[in-house]
Image (cartoon, grey):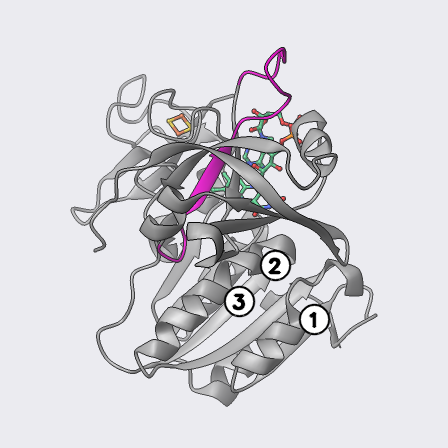
Amino acid sequence: METPVTPVQVTGTVLTTRRVEAYHALTVVAPGIAERFRPGHFVAVAVGGPQTSMLTRRAFSVHDVKPDYGGTVEFVFTVRGPGTSWLAGRRARDTLDLVGPLGRPFPLPRDPVSCLLVGGEYGSATLFGLADALQQRDCRVDFLLGGASEDRVFGALRARRMGVTTTLTTEDGSLGLRGTVTDALPGVITDTRADVVYACGPMDMLRGVTAVSVEFDIPVQVAVEEAMACGFGMCMTCVLPVIGDDGVTRMVRACVEGPVFRGERVRFDDVGTIPFDALGAPGAPGHSGARHVS
Ligand SMILES: Cc1cc2nc3c(=O)[nH]c(=O)nc-3n(C[C@H](O)[C@H](O)[C@H](O)COP(=O)(O)OP(=O)(O)OC[C@H]3O[C@@H](n4cnc5c(N)ncnc54)[C@H](O)[C@@H]3O)c2cc1C
Ligand code: FES
């Protein structure tokens, strides 16, 4: 398991902004973060400027780090609400307050194995640094990327350049196979003889990818996107039920113990609840049903 790195807070200058299909990409000069980065890390970005009422930072996976200007960090995002709308309005030379790198990165195999990287929508962004690290270890890398439509499949060109094979899926059939990455996964695992699956994307996708990987009896590492507030372990907003090595379910923080977990350990069906059999759950064991957490 990777040793956690100490995150830093950086006021970085926006170097470039660009549109990538349906997404926005911001590159920020943030040397302290870039030099500590490992694939799977994320950053927590302050939004709204100094007078804002938006108190919580917004979490984004790191897409790329480059050595330019002492170290830059790029993240890719879709506009969802006020925080991401504000970010979409940033321009070169604006400043941004970032904390990172945060979370536990993807564990890397010791041996040169065959790795299948599965991404949904902007979740694919975090997979390219991982692909690079795996290829440096002589691992075979294949990609399976998907989205609702062609403009929501992130990184298809880069995947085609990096991967031995790249399979694309769209729900509306506008690019690649019609359907979801989960639909295509059994065939791709078989064709690529994958030894391990890495995945990032919406929770439903991760649940499906985990189920298929378990069927094929291959390990699966998933980077989850659980709603966050602080991003560094203080507020418990991001807890989800995960089974430990001892078989006991605990409510663990996605921002500190994750966001990367072994897929089969995440109780996807109980995310958003405290299962009655989780350690420290309110009520006695046998108490009816799960409790909802907001
Ligand atoms: C580890 C991690 C990595 C992420 N990486 C990316 C990425 O690479 N690109 C991208 O577009 N989005 C990513 N997200 C989701 C992103 O954080 C949310 O889209 C964003 O916080 C929404 O903020 P908002 O103000 O625009 O929307 P609102 O919905 O108004 O947000 C309100 C509040 O809810 C929280 N929130 C809402 N939705 C999410 C969510 N899905 N995940 C976490 N917090 C949420 C916000 O932090 C904020 O505190 C990631 C989330 C996590 C946890
Ligand atoms: S977001 Fe605060 S503990 Fe994880």
Q: Which residue is mark 1?
A: 169
The amino acid marked with disc number 1 is Thr
Residue 227: x percent and y percent? 52, 32
Q: Is mark 1 within 8 Å of ligand 1?
A: no
Q: Which residue is mark 3?
A: 118
Check if mark 3's residue and mark 2's residue have beta carbons within 8 Å: yes
Query: Visible in this render: residue 236?
Result: yes
Image-quarter location of ligand 2: top left
Q: Badge 3: few (under 14), some or many (20 or more) residues near its Cα, within 10 Å? A: many
Helix, strand or loop status at disc 2: strand
Helix, strand or loop status at disc 3: strand
Residue at the spot 30% in from the left edge and 32% down from the top edge? 277
Horizontal placement of 53 versus 269: left or right? Answer: right
Q: Badge 1: few (under 14), some or many (20 or more) residues near its Cα, within 10 Å? A: many
Image position of 81 with respect to 173: above or below: above
The amino acid marked with disc number 3 is Val
Q: Which residue is mark 2?
A: 120
